[in-house]
Amino acid sequence: MYQYDDRDRALLADRVKQFHGQTERYLRGELTEEEFLPLRLQNGLYVQRLAPMLRIAVPYGLLSSRQLRRLARITRDYDKGYAHFTTRQNLQLNWPNLEDVPDILTELAEVEMHAVQTSGNCIRNTTSDPYAGVARDEILDPRPYCELIRQWSTFHPEFAYLPRKFKIAVNGAKSDRAAIRVHDIGVQMVRREGEIGFEIYVGGGQGRTPVIAERIREFLPERHLLSYLEAIVRIYNQLGRRDNKYKARIKILVKAMGATEFGRLVENEWQLVKEGADQLTPEAIEWAKSFFRSPDYTHFDGAESDAALAAQAAADKGFARWLERNTHPHRVAGYRAVRLSTKPTGVPPGDVTDSQMEAIANLAERYSFGEARVTHDQNVVLADVRQDQLYEVWREARGHGLATPNIGTLTDMICCPGGDYCSLANAKSIPVAEAIQREFDDMDYLYDLGDLNLNISGCMNACGHHHVGHIGILGVDKKGEEYFQVQLGGSASERASLGKVLGPSFSRAEVAGVIRKLLDVYVGARREGELFIDTYHRIGLEPFKESVYAQAS
């Protein structure tokens, strides 16, 4: 992972010192709430329903063991002993005291972390595939390019005050595990006749107006990545609406003028900057790649290693379940990537305690070259675990509540903090998540259902990505009461789609039962080997709708 140099450290130290002074002035009454607002947002600080919330940047999801230990200590010393992993691969503290935030930022800076540009109308944390660098279907490792985008976008003087927040995702594999088609800019790595380049998608997003991004360039040569992104954001900065925040995102601009016309404007703007300072030289690309070299893997005989692992799985059913669901094939023989689940029943999805963070740090240090990765579905990946050590990892992770064998199943849900924390939420999403966890606690049933994405948001801002869940749940307000709207058929994969609303909303107490009825329709209608999303696309919305509302009436 990228290591800060002296200039990085000096810049960050100056930023922290500056915010110390700003916070002290605000607490003394020398800055008004209106004056302090943009200053705190530039440092990742929100004021939520019950307390401040500090969002800490985790660039493209990568964390070292040292950083995890520091986050654990901060969570213990300055918060309530737990924190929350987000769908942007960041970490949120939900209970810090305002006066402590500058000290937290000081502690973060000591381990090369910060909260810069995790909020406000700027380019946010660039996200990517949690299996980057180890996936078998990878075209090229996207992490060096994520780092180049991070450095280009951080403190960019022209893009510090965009019409609205701006999000970029980069995918380097054939399977889209970075949800690039629901981002303001999605970057897909490609090879054409041996040359590295990118497909560029623009105008995706969720929230009040969900849109699937459109491709505006089929092949962008590698050296032009930053200059082309510069051109896109320039056009958005010039033409994006600032009079109405609900119509300010780039997706509205692209939809209004059409992708063809938007792409034409970008191409014209690009001609002004393509040969400028942002052009990536071979030296710059190699410099970025130097931080993401392959670790010192042990050589294994693949067949022998696989056979030994199969024998372990045959001897222990619990381990076999975890192995099937919570590990992922690795490009190097004798290794697997491990997903640590943050979603046991009764725990808000994405929440981790200080002791769990320390446990993850220890696991990463002993078994995965000292590195862990936050996923966009709020779990944690150890990317480089030897197969002969998987059993040890499973036993240790299980002891810390991090080995629930539910990855990819219904209960491996994405869920925003909702009305328990967020001042924007219309409803509490965490109790709905727990009700569904308790309703569907039979692992054999979950495995029989197969891969199924269920996403929950507490409001239209869609922090829980409900629009692209196979089953999406949205909290709505009905005359001061919490209700929940259900959507079906969404996907954030390479076959991205937006869910369709099932019908009238339900009370909180009804939601788990509604999900049960939807699954009964799927089980009754599916063909052999057919997943929920495939059955939905084949039979459509109506059979699900008829079942739910006919039985409810």
Image (spheres, rainbow, N blue to C red):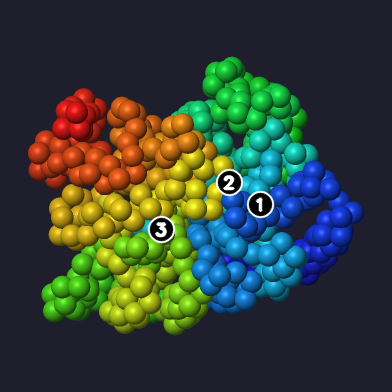
On the image, which quarter does residue 310 sit in? bottom left
Q: Nearer the viewer, mark 3 or mark 2?
A: 2
Tell which circle, 1 or 2, labels the residue nearer the N-terminal end.
Answer: 1
In the rendered structure, which amino acid carries the disc numbered 3? Pro
- Is mark 3 in CB contact (under 8 Å) with mark 1? no
* Picture coordinates of residue 35, whole percent (x, y): 83, 46
In the rendered structure, which amino acid carries the disc numbered 1? Val
- Name the residue beneath numbered marker 1: 47
The answer to whether residue 206 is left or right of residue 408 is right
- Name the residue beneath numbered marker 2: 423
- Is mark 1 in CB contact (under 8 Å) with mark 2? yes
The residue furthest front is 480
Q: Residue at x 72, y 44 (%)?
A: 278
Q: Secondary structure at mark 3?
A: loop
Disc 3 crowd rating (10 Å Cα; few below 14, some 14-19, many 20+) is many
* Picture coordinates of residue 259, whole percent (x, y): 54, 22
Q: Which mark is residue 349?
A: 3
In the rendered structure, which amino acid carries the disc numbered 2? Ser
